[in-house]
Amino acid sequence: MLWFDGVLQEGTRAAFDLADRGLTLGDGVFDTALARDGRIVLEDAHIARLVDAAARLGFPLDPAEIREAMRAVAGAHPRAAIRTNATRGAGPRGLAPPAEPRPCLWASAAPLADSFACAPLRLHPTEIRRNDTSPASRLKTLGYLDAVLAAGEARARGFDEALFRNTQGRVACAGTGNVFALFGTRLVTPPLSEGVLPGIVRAEILARAGDWGFVPSEQALMPADLIRAEAVFVTNSLRILSPVRAIGTTAYAAHPATGILAAGLNAAMDG
Amino acid sequence: MLWFDGVLQEGTRAAFDLADRGLTLGDGVFDTALARDGRIVLEDAHIARLVDAAARLGFPLDPAEIREAMRAVAGAHPRAAIRTNATRGAGPRGLAPPAEPRPCLWASAAPLADSFACAPLRLHPTEIRRNDTSPASRLKTLGYLDAVLAAGEARARGFDEALFRNTQGRVACAGTGNVFALFGTRLVTPPLSEGVLPGIVRAEILARAGDWGFVPSEQALMPADLIRAEAVFVTNSLRILSPVRAIGTTAYAAHPATGILAAGLNAAMDG
């Protein structure tokens, strides 16, 4: 199911401008949200992040229109992955944006199995670095090819996902989520400046984990820090909180913090 | 003018699958070629590079279909920029490609002013690094957002284009072209491993400049090397060979090598 240009339709084919800069240059952003029984989880946060990302690229989005698009497709499945996309719109040849951008917005829904959330993951440390020198590394842009390539490499080696370091060799993120490491009660994730996306679940954990008995913080992490962590988690809006079972040859046992964090997040997401 | 799905049409809007991975993930490649009086310059090299780039991403393209697409739009303008795009096609939600990709191919033409070729350029050294750790840095993929951001920054500071270093701090390329530096008769460009695109004009210079009295070579360059170079050039298929007038605060005078190289390239392009 697709909402495009104000119209809800079946299928995913639409009259699209092939000069759209989202397609020709990756000049656009998107959001992935979870919908349960037609309701977008943490809707306001998702809308705000998408508006902010577009603003950082220099084009305006209307929060009300994003809400309309997301809600239009939210009820397509009992549990749905909602993808909302926004580009700067069409432009002439070359890199320079048009003086008056005419952004393009659309949203689609895909069914999501209940088992997807919180499923354990095995991560492959890829040699492709997350480019923290680029502002785009902190925006959920359409350019996901590095993540696609690293995920393919990870699957070929028997892993579920890639783990990225940044250009400084420090831990950045997983291919499709933020990374948290647990040391006692300290729950640490790299700051955005390391080249990571401002994940919605990441923000929830940083804001609320203090109430659940943890000491959350943003701090740079070296790969060696992950090896000595008691537990490692990948967070995103669809997985919510996935315990990491392995990073390369390092194995992680199940840890009771997983259940506490997942319960806290589930309560926050119902709120 | 647009060739899409085997059909030539006016305008750029077409029935496009919004689940196409080129749009959703930047999972695609493109080519920019020059057409003069309906003839694609260095056509075989452009087709071969596009086929190779798609193969490296893991999807097949038919050279004959690319040729058909390019030629269909080549006559749209006396001097035209031909953009040929190929994506892996539509896929389900997530990063994993479909088992059987159904690539999508289209080409468009835009008019190009005669004055565009060989126009001098002033380059702004951006702090955004070219990510040489990624195979995508050596493929002309749809993900051009770093180049878009760096070009905007360059224009805001009164420059024409950005100059990228790679993650090691060495010279990589301009936002839309390869870089050559001249030292006596030595004409040096960074090797592809530095995170640069296999430019068609770049390859022509490496193959032919020996006949024009130069000693071409692929060698790593530090920013300090550019400062002591006698001349610096940006090459791409539309600019062909643009002399660099400034990199940041370093100015470059006009150099007689420019005319020799431009004449050699023009002859090669007519061949």
Image: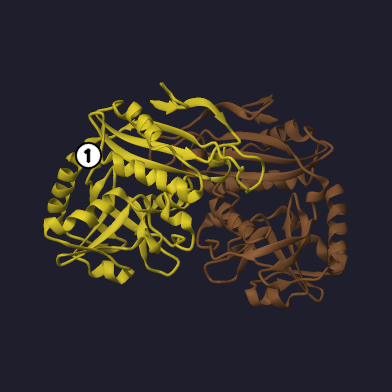
Chain colours: A brown, B yellow
- Quadrant for the N terminus of chain B in the image: top left
Image point (73%, 45%), residue name: A33
The answer, for residue B256, to whether it is visible in the render is: no
In this rendered view, identify the residue nearer to me: A24 or A204: A24
Q: Position of residue A87 (x, y in %)?
A: 55, 39
Task: Name above or below for residue B137 compared with residue A229.
Answer: above
- Where, by quadrant of the figure, is residue A262 drawn? bottom right
In this rendered view, identify the residue nearer to me: A28 or A227: A227
Residue highlighted by disc 1: B115
Amino acid on which disc 1 is placed: Ser
What crowding class fits label 1: few (fewer than 14 Cα within 10 Å), some (14-19), or many (20 or more)?
few
Image point (64%, 72%), residue name: A220
Q: Position of residue B53 (x, y in %)?
A: 43, 48
B268 left or right of B166 in image = left
Q: Position of residue A93 (x, y in %)?
A: 38, 37
* SS category of the residue bearing label 1: helix
The image shows a total of numbered marks equal to: 1
Image point (47%, 57%), residue name: B135
- Where, by quadrant of the figure, is residue A174 drawn? bottom right
The chain to which mark 1 is attached is B
Q: Position of residue B11 (x, y in %)?
A: 43, 23
Task: Name above or below for residue B188 compared with residue A142.
Answer: below
Image point (72%, 78%), residue name: A228
B239 left or right of A190 in image = left
- Quadrant for the C terminus of chain B in the image: top left
The answer, for residue B217, to whether it is visible in the render is: yes
